[in-house]
Amino acid sequence: MKDNYNRNITYLRISITDRCNLRCTYCMPEEGVDKLSHKDLLSFEEIVEFTKQAVAMGINKVRLTGGEPLVRKGIVDLVKMLWDIDGIKDLALTTNAVLLKEYAQPLKDAGLQRLNISLDTLDKERFAQITRRDKLEEVLAGIDEAIKVGFKQIKLNCVIEKTKKEPDAVAVAKYAEDKGLQARFIRTMNLEKGEFWIVDGGDGGNCSICNRIRLSSSGDVLPCLFSDLGYNIREFGNKEAILQALEHKPQKGTISKKNEFYTVGG
């Protein structure tokens, strides 16, 4: 399916929770946020039915995000339900890896193919400063377990201020090389100011070739991260919400005063 700028939309990013077990300074306030009520959070059944409709219209790549998707109870079951949908060629997940040591093998067995893992530093004190949690050892153990179980691809997402030559980024790049992983470097973004850049090592941020739509944890189909446009599947229905997102997908991102990274994914 194509939008009004002839971009072929094949990629769906699904935020399955607004909750997270870290409090990264660039994503969430230290005290946390008011969590979505159970009734406002999409059920697995709603997510699966929406995804089936999206696949029927041309989506073939799906990524699960959060918040932190591994804190959502039943995540392995959801992965299996999604992988069973005929037409999905690529199923991936973005995680901070705090819980990954426990979940790596079950996720792979359920059908998950690829992982993007957030890792901004290898310095224990810096990690605690950035995430406001002392969890670096758990993250590194999770990465090792993911490598051990043999995912098709594992990428490390490293948030930087300006350049990948910053000390933390250099250390992450060396770690990735040593582990046989791919590192991507993402400049700190600001939704309200419309500040975003093309990901170093990826296609994110390149509006001219954007091929994605998003489903928020509360059911809004978002045509663009840097836009306040959203069409709720409970109001519009699955197919119409997708059609509206396609019709109104902007040529490029501008600003968003409504979205938050922890509810729509990065």
Image (spheres, rainbow, N blue to C red):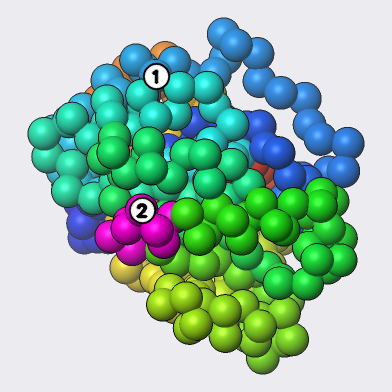
Q: Nearer the viewer, mark 2 or mark 1?
A: 2
Would residue 118 be found to the left or right of residue 16 on screen?
right
Q: Is residue 24 visible?
A: no
Residue 213, above or below 241: below
Residue 2 percent coordinates (x, y): 20, 51
Question: Which amino acid type is shown beneath numbered disc 1?
Answer: Phe
Of the residues under marks 2 and 1, which one precedes in the sequence? 1
User: What residue is drawn where x is 71% and y is 23%?
Assistant: 35
Disc 1 target residue: 44
Disc 2 target residue: 149
User: What residue is drawn where x is 36% and y is 24%?
Assistant: 77
- Asked which quadrant contains residue 118, the reply is bottom right
Question: Which amino acid type is shown beneath numbered disc 2?
Answer: Val
Q: Residues within 10 Å of mark 2 (few under 14, many from 20)?
A: some
- Asked which quadrant contains residue 125, the reply is bottom right
Q: Is residue 85 magenta?
A: no
Q: Is residue 152 magenta?
A: yes
Q: Secondary structure at mark 2?
A: helix
Residue 251 percent coordinates (x, y): 40, 61
From which residue to which does the magenta span run? 146-153
Q: Which residue is nearer to you in this view: 191 or 102?
A: 102
Q: Which residue is nearer to you in this view: 123 or 79?
A: 123
